[in-house]
Image (tube, helix red, strand yellow):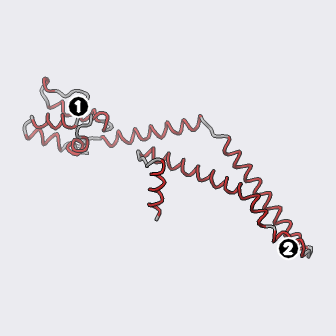
Amino acid sequence: MKLWDVIRTVGSGVIREVVPGGGILVDAVNEFLPSDKKLPSNATGEDIDGALSALPPEQQARILEKEFDVDLTRIRQSNETVRAMLESDAKNQHTTRPYIAKGAFHVIAFAVVLVVSTWSYGVIMNRENLVEAVSSGWPFVLSVIGPFVVLLHAYFGVLKSEHKNRLDAAAGKSGAAGMAGLLSNLIRRK
């Protein structure tokens, strides 16, 4: 990334705080400045711009055209963020939600196997009244297993959103929170 692009982006922000590896930029500019005009460690983009304007044009051109590896530092910081998040997850294992989801799955599986087995038995044994009772009893079965289906759907939806939030955080993206986030997601889907 060229220094002029960084200066234009940062503006009045402190280089070391705004740009990962910003200290490299301040040090590079300080190499060309006289000792009485060296920039402090909390130099802003405007400070660097002012210091560069005091230099002769050929030195300005050499500094402004120099490529800096601030992207490499950004990648390293992103990797450290991901590593910290993974270590945190390894220490803090979620145990309650998976057991609740497993219990909900067992209830749904039991209900479905019971209904299908009863219906199959009625068909095989030629018991039309049993087949009719099972076929007309679907509202009851649905009302029994419906809450468990909703619970499982919510559980896996939460896992999906947690995973997306982790990936966004690792990539340095931030989304709108609360109602604004919900509305932006709805608008984006259409």
Foreground residue among 155 and 22:
155
- Please provide percent x and percent y for residue 131: 86, 72
Q: Residue furthest left?
A: 56
Residue 101 x, y percent position in the rendering: 69, 49
Q: Residue at x 59, y 53 (%)?
A: 157
Name the residue: 58% across, 49% down: 159
The image shows residue 144, relative to residue 98, as above or below, that is below
Q: Residue at x 67, y 56 (%)?
A: 150
Q: Position of 185 compared to 41: left or right?
A: right
Count of number-bearing discs: 2
What secondary structure is found at the residue carrying circle 2? helix
Q: Position of residue 69 (x, y in %)?
A: 29, 41
Instruction: List the single residue furthest toward the front.
Output: 179
Left or right: where 74 falls relative to 190: left
SS for tag 1? loop
Tag nearer the camera, 2 or 1: 2
Nearer to the camera, 87 or 72:
87
Residue 158, label in figure: none
Tell me the amino acid under the disc marked 1: Ala
Q: Quadrant of the N terminus?
A: top left
Mark 2 and 1 residues: CB-CB less than 8 Å, in contact?
Answer: no
Q: Position of residue 29 (x, y in %)?
A: 18, 33
Q: Is residue 60 left or right of residue 185?
A: left
Residue receiving disc 1: 43
Neighbours of disc 2 within 10 Å: few (<14), some (14-19), many (20+): few
Mark 2–mark 1 Cα distance, whole angstroms, equals: 81 Å
Please report whichever mark, 2 or 1, sits nearer to the chain's N-terminal start: 1
Circle 2 residue = 132
Quadrant of the rendered image containing residue 20: top left
Q: Is residue 61 left or right of residue 178?
A: left
Q: Residue at x 12, y 27 (%)?
A: 34
